[in-house]
Image (cartoon, helix red, strand yellow):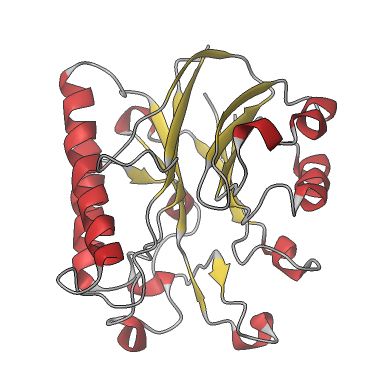
């Protein structure tokens, strides 16, 4: 089961890039974040033509939005809203092999890492807290035992997930309070970082590079904001993992590169 997570930063604007990627990589399941597209304008035809006949789309105009596109049929789908906001940041699809795939777009959090003065940062921390409570409740109810969690988490948790640990400690996405909140969520399901199964610490690994850099490869000031995790029941199933940074070289690309993991189910 080949699963991809990609913050596409407008699916309609970059549908040709998505098409190119899918033809090259042929994943079974593609999870997109930041669709910036209401459901009625989603480019279903392009995915249908490429064999992605099973689509769970949860979008909105101009902002956010998540989707799961699959060659494999769904047995069920689900949507969860957090923080009393219907801002299209989660969707789930379950498959015949017993695996649930959850697609998340965690709030970015703005620029100032202080919830007292930055409402966006407060929202991010509240979102992470609710995610943690929600997953704990799912496990109590017997759900989510065999699951893959993917998405733009907007947090680079390890010092090896950023180009400079010291310089980014006070920058939103790598502050200790965010890292600790994400770690609480990880512990709630004992999740395993699937990509780090192939690229263990202390290897540097990034999935996002700012648009501000004219030569992103040369400066390589990246962060690993995009993740694919799995529940303990899937331990040992990862056969391959990579960041498809070639996509970052394309004309007018997303600032995020696709993250790819292959599982032996």
Q: Give how far across and how far down residue 245 sits, in percent.
A: 67, 64
Answer with left or right where residue 234 lies relative to residue 198: left
Q: Give how far across and how far down residue 31 sits, in percent.
A: 57, 39
**Residue 153, quarter of the rendered image:** bottom left
Residue 49, compared with residue 241, is above or below; it is: above
Which quadrant does the N terminus fall into?
top right
The image shows a total of numbered marks equal to 0
Q: Give how far across and how far down residue 173 sits, in percent.
A: 35, 69
Residue at the location (15% across, 21% down)? 140
User: Residue 121 or 22: which is nearer the viewer?
Assistant: 121
Q: Give how far across and how far down residue 201 sits, in percent.
A: 39, 65
Residue 191, compared with residue 166, is above or below; it is: above
Residue 101, compared with residue 177, is above or below; it is: above
Residue at the location (25% across, 65% down)? 119
Residue at the location (79% across, 53% down)? 17
User: Residue 192 or 74: which is nearer the viewer?
Assistant: 74
Answer with left or right where residue 233 lies relative to residue 194: left
Answer with left or right where residue 129 lies relative to residue 110: left
């Amino acid at each position: 089961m080949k699963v991809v997570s990609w913050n596409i930063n407008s699916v309609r604007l970059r549908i040709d890039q998505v098409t190119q990627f899918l033809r090259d990589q042929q994943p079974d399941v593609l999870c997109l974040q930041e669709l910036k597209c209401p459901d009625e304008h989603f480019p279903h035809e392009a995915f249908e033509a490429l064999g992605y006949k099973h689509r769970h789309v949860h979008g909105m105009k101009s902002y956010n939005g998540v989707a799961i596109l699959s060659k494999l049929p769904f047995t069920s789908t689900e949507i969860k809203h957090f923080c009393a906001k219907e801002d299209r940041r989660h969707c789930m699809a379950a498959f015949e092999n017993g695996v649930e795939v959850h697609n998340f777009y965690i709030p970015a959090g703005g620029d100032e890492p202080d919830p007292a003065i930055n409402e966006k940062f407060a929202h991010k921390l509240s979102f992470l807290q609710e995610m943690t409570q929600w997953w704990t409740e799912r496990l109590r109810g017997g759900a989510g035992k065999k699951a893959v969690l993917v998405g733009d988490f907007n947090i680079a948790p390890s010092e090896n997930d950023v180009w400079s640990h010291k310089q980014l400690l006070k920058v939103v996405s790598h502050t200790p309070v965010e890292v600790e909140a994400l770690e609480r969520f990880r512990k709630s399901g004992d999740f395993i970082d699937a990509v780090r199964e192939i690229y263990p610490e202390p290897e540097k690994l990034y999935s996002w590079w700012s648009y501000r850099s004219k030569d992103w490869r040369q400066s390589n000031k990246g962060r690993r904001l995009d993740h694919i995790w799995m529940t303990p029941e899937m331990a040992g199933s990862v056969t391959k993992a990579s960041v498809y940074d070639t996509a970052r070289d394309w004309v007018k690309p997303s600032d995020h590169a696709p993250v790819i993991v292959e599982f032996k189910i």
